[in-house]
Image (cartoon, grey):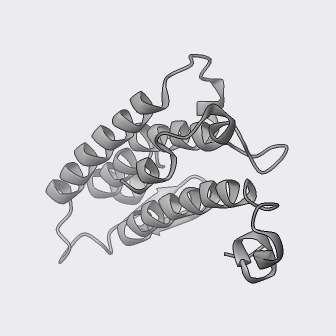
Amino acid sequence: MTLHSLVFGLSDKWLVSDEGEGTWNAIQAADHLIECENYNWIPRLETILEEGEKTVFPPFDRFAHLNNVQSVPLKQLLEELQKGREENILKMKALVNPETDLERTGLHPAFGVVKARDLLSTWVVHDLTHIAQISRILAEGYREDVGPWKEYLGILNNGS
């Protein structure tokens, strides 16, 4: 898993670094991804496939992970995320017939009508968003160490 490769074995200093006020560190991002695995992607996919537009998606609190007061070791978080992802991929494959189900629709509480295809694509890009976020945090830790090469490194210049 990409996230494991990025953060496993890093010191706490790296793991609790963030991009400033109101942003998340690597541990919080992992917690958030676990919340998504447990309460977002598959429940909403099931709603599309079982209820269509008759039922609004189940609520999902994007910030619920910030209320987790337990300090869980990173290794345990990564294992939980991996397990949840593997289970959800199997569920998705069992639920979705790519020939007939990708255009089926459901009702998002903010966006209105969305397709199964939209939800599944968002799942992928959501992961990439948090991988990019963590990559930016890690790169920032090297800002001074790269010396003059900084100007060639887009990730350190509001790019990627």
Q: Is residue 64 left or right of residue 87?
A: right
Looking at the image, is 22 positioned above or below residue 52? above
User: Which residue is drawn at the image coordinates 59% and 63% (left, top)?
Assistant: 132
As drawn, 85 above or below 98 = above
Q: Residue at x 52, y 60 (%)?
A: 126
In the image, taking residue 113 as reference, residue 154 lies left or right, namely right
| Count of numbered circles on the image | 0
Percent of width and height locating residue 116: 36, 66
- Residue depicted at 81% across the width and 70% down the height: 147
Picture quarter containing residue 142?
A: bottom right
Q: Position of residue 157 (x, y in %)?
A: 80, 74
Q: For residue 146, which quarter of the picture?
A: bottom right
Q: Position of residue 154 (x, y in %)?
A: 72, 78
Q: Residue furthest top?
A: 70
The quarter of the image holding the C terminus is: bottom right
Is residue 21 in view? yes
Regarding residue 55, the answer to whether it shows in the image is no
Query: Relative to residue 102, is residue 141 drawn left or right?
Result: right
Along the line of sight, the residue nearer the viewer: 39 or 140: 140
Which residue is more in the foreground, 93 or 112? 93
> Furthest-bottom residue in view?
152
Q: Is residue 150 left or right of residue 99?
A: right
Who's the residue at 35% across and 53% down the image?
1
Q: Is residue 50 above or below residue 21?
A: below
